[in-house]
Amino acid sequence: MMTLTTVSKSVSVNSVLVYWRVGTKRKGVLDVRMGFSTEDQEIIAELIAIRHLIMNTKVFCCTPTTGKGFQVRVSKGAIRKIVQGRSDKASASRFASLLTGRMEGISVNVSHSMDFMISAQEAAETGQIEVLEAAGKNFASPHETIETPTIGTLSVTRHAVQRYEERLNSKSQDERLYRPWSSLFSRLRNPSLERTQVNDKVMHHKMRRYGKSNAVEVWSHPSDTMRYVVVTRSDNRKVLVTVFERPHDYF
């Protein structure tokens, strides 16, 4: 199991050092500059660091689409409670969407050990302290972003994943979908995905819910009945907002 270990320690107001390692050789320190005040500074900084290390630094040498086979050892028990859905820390929970969404099912354990971690002094001397300016960056976004060959950069909402999972699970009670994010991402990356014309009744329904017709697109694979509703936001971001299913002869 691939494991990322993190320990967060506040050094000043709005600044937290997050020590990290993968194994015993790969290690470093992130100086997370919060840019905002919060009583959960260390918790949020550690969650920001985890997302940055996994998605940007790629400490697992891949971009995960599931939590299976991965583990994080964190220094704050509140993070484990957030992932387990047992926390009332709403503000901090917003920063855990990677662990509760795309990497749902990841193993989360708590450890305060600094064994094998690099010291702050050694990290400073060897240039292994990375400053991460968290202000202005969307670390609390509930959406996960992927690159697709046909739609382009696409933000995927949790609602869309849930609807996708419901649709597939409704087909078979015996074979449940255990990795919905990974399965959906795989379909969205299919190069044969194309924009689909739908009848007026369906389009009017989607327009009422998601906006003007020129901002709502429906995509599908020619041989599949699954339909993906993509909305272009005012900032030109494309967002997958929901998934529905229709037989081929419905349109």
Image: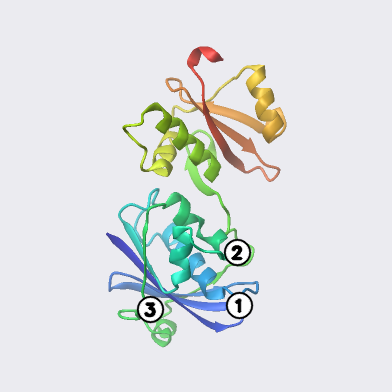
Q: Which residue is disc 3 drawn over? A: 112
Amino acid at pointer 3: His
On the image, the x and y values in percent for residue 221 come to 46, 25
Q: Residues within 10 Å of mark 3 (few under 14, many from 20)?
A: some
Residue name at image x 66 percent, y 42 percent: 236
The reply to whether residue 203 is visible in this rendering is: yes
| Image quarter of residue 135 | bottom right
On the image, the x and y values in percent for residue 6 come to 40, 72
Determine whether label 1 and label 3 are within 8 Å by CB: no
Q: Provide the secondary structure element on which disc 2 rests.
A: helix
Q: Which residue is disc 2 drawn over? A: 91
Q: In this view, does 14 lie to the left or right of 221?
A: right
- Residue 14: which numbered mark, if any? 1
Amino acid at pointer 2: Ser
Residue name at image x 37 percent, y 43 percent: 179
Q: Is residue 240 left or right of residue 118?
A: right
